């Protein structure tokens, strides 16, 4: 049993090049306050903290959990101190280092501002390199643009309870990233029968063939652990952009790259020959129920 | 004497049926005609195919898989796209020369008697092995930068319509020269029409 004297784990949330999207996303966690109360927040740029930026950048104490948000830029300074120095200082003694979002994990969107030098903490896209590579065994990547609040909440709870977090090759927790965002997609029947969606925002149709959906190629549990507990990109008619993968952002997010009408990228692990055989046959059938609005069909049948 | 297996018997029926259907036409050819030519009783024939329509559909699948396997081999060979086009043209014309009944059946029975194939052979169901390989060919051609990215059916129609047309002319004995003598020029024309711009 915990006594009042039990020391809470200390946590620092520090930012590199970022739009603050991960911070804002995390603030949507439904039990945020309860979770935060379990930590001593030494520093967070948007939360009440026990230390200020001067004390943090002075690098005079340590923390148990170090969360980094944003792309790492080796030239970037905070409070006139190089971020690389701050990172290396806290990474040395932290028990856990969490890269919050795709920028911190792989470079992400802000890598584009200086692609030759910017990166994530221990990955430069999928290449295993970064400013704290020597502490890689402590790094947990929670990719996503932005981070899914539940995923970070889950990870922090696992850390709190000192449970082992198994990670994949890209250091993402397997429990969260073994699913594809295709799993749980409400459009799966349209994918099975190869019925395309011609427009965004519609409830009907699959977004894989024309609209650029990366769900069958993206490790993420967005359609299993819903956003704000109610929705996901594909559920509202927007394609999955593949934002949890190391190659994010790709170009032309809203259109499927095809070669002579044939999708260039296949669902993970599916040979193109097998896919095309099935797709060709499935497209042969005309299924009235799947061709128009489901509500209209229901009214007339 | 070695015993004839069931598969060999089936292959024998397919071979004879292809020839009869393509020479005499689908409706004129009867099951007794086929059975007689194969050297089996009509009753025994039905152990292999339960109706003429089912045989007709199986023949399309057979041809599609035969051509598909040949194109797959070409797709998997380490040669340039231009050379692959030549190899596909060459394979198709050689087949029209050596096994004319296959192409004839495809052109004169499958494409001309759609009512026979409307159930069970809709769309690409019976020809998927062959069409899939052409999809792979086009996809890889575009990805390698050799072919122009365009609508699949525009490219498919140009390629196969052209070959089918030439074989039709050959079958009608209109071509002044052998099919083989057209391989080079037709492969070049197809490549010129499909290549990256």
Image (cartoon, grey):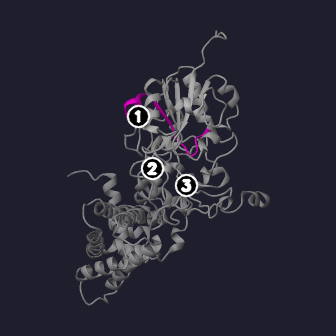
| Residue identifier under label 1 | A132
Chain under label 3? A
In space, the residues marked 2 and 1 are separated at their CA atoms by: 20 Å
Residue at the image point whose x is 49% and y is 44% from the top: A71
Quadrant of the image occupied by residue A254: bottom right
x and y, in percent, of residue A121 in the image: 44, 38
Residue A197 falls in which quadrant of the image? bottom right
Quadrant (top left/top right/bottom left/bottom right) for the C terminus of chain A? bottom right
Of residues A120 and B9, the one drawn nearer to the viewer in this rendering: A120
Please tell me in which quadrant of the rendered image residue B33 appears.
bottom left
Q: Read off the residue under disc 3.
A: A213
Q: Earlier in the sequence, mark 2 or mark 3?
A: 3
Magenta span contains residue B182: no
Which SS class for mark 3?
loop
Tell me if mark 1 has few (under 14), some (14-19) or many (20+) residues whose alpha carbon lies within 10 angstroms of its own. Answer: many
Q: Could you say whether the residue bearing mark 2 is in a helix, strand or loop?
A: loop
Label 3 or label 1, whichever comes before in sequence order: 1
Is B33 or B144 nearer to us in this picture? B144
Q: Nearer the viewer, mark 2 or mark 3?
A: 2
Looking at the rendering, the stretch of residues picked out in magenta corresponds to A133-148
């Amino acid at each position: 049993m915990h006594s009042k004297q039990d020391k809470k784990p200390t946590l620092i949330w520090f930012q590199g090049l970022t739009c603050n999207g991960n911070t804002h996303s995390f603030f949507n966690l439904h039990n945020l306050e309860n979770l935060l109360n379990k930590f001593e927040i030494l520093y967070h740029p948007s939360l009440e903290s026990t230390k200020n930026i001067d004390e943090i950048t002075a690098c005079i104490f340590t923390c148990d959990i170090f969360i980094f948000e944003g792309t790492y830029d080796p030239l970037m300074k905070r409070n006139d101190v190089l971020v690389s120095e701050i990172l290396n200082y806290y990474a040395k003694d932290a028990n856990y280092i969490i890269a919050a979002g795709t920028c911190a994990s792989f470079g992400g969107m802000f890598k584009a501002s200086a692609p030759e030098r910017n990166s994530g903490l221990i990955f430069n896209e999928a290449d295993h390199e970064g400013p704290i590579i020597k502490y890689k065994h402590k790094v947990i990547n929670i990719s996503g643009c932005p981070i899914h609040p539940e995923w970070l909440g889950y990870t922090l709870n696992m850390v709190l309870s000192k449970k082992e977090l198994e990670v994949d090759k890209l250091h993402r927790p397997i429990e969260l990233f073994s699913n594809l965002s295709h799993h749980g997609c409400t459009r799966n029947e349209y994918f099975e029968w190869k019925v395309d969606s011609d427009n965004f925002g519609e409830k009907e149709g699959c977004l894989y063939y024309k609209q650029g959906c990366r769900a069958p190629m993206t490790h993420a549990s967005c359609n299993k652990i819903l956003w704000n507990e109610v929705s996901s990109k594909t559920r509202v008619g927007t394609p999955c952009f593949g934002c949890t993968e190391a190659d994010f952002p790709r170009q032309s997010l809203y259109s499927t790259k095809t070669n002579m009408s044939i999708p260039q990228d296949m669902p993970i692990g599916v040979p193109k020959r097998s896919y095309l055989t099935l797709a060709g046959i499935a497209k042969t059938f005309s299924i009235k129920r799947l061709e128009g609005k489901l509500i209209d069909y229901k009214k007339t049948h | 004497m070695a015993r004839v297996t069931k598969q060999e018997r089936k292959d024998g029926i397919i071979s004879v049926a292809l020839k009869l259907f393509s020479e005499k036409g689908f409706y004129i050819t009867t099951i007794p005609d086929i059975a007689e030519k194969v050297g089996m009783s009509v009753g025994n024939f039905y152990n292999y195919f339960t109706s003429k329509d089912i045989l007709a559909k199986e023949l399309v699948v057979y041809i599609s898989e035969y051509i598909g396997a040949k194109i797959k081999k070409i797709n998997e060979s380490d040669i340039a796209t231009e050379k692959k086009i030549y190899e596909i043209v060459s394979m198709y014309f050689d087949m029209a020369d050596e096994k004319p009944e296959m192409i004839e059946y495809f052109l004169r029975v499958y494409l001309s008697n759609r009512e026979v194939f409307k159930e069970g052979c809709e769309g690409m169901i019976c020809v998927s092995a062959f069409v899939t390989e052409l999809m792979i060919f086009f996809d890889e051609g575009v990805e390698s930068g050799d072919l122009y990215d365009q609508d699949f059916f525009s490219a498919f129609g140009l390629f196969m319509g052209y070959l089918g047309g030439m074989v039709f002319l050959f079958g009608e004995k209109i071509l002044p020269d052998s099919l083989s003598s057209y391989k080079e020029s037709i492969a070049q024309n197809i490549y010129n029409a499909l290549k990256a711009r």
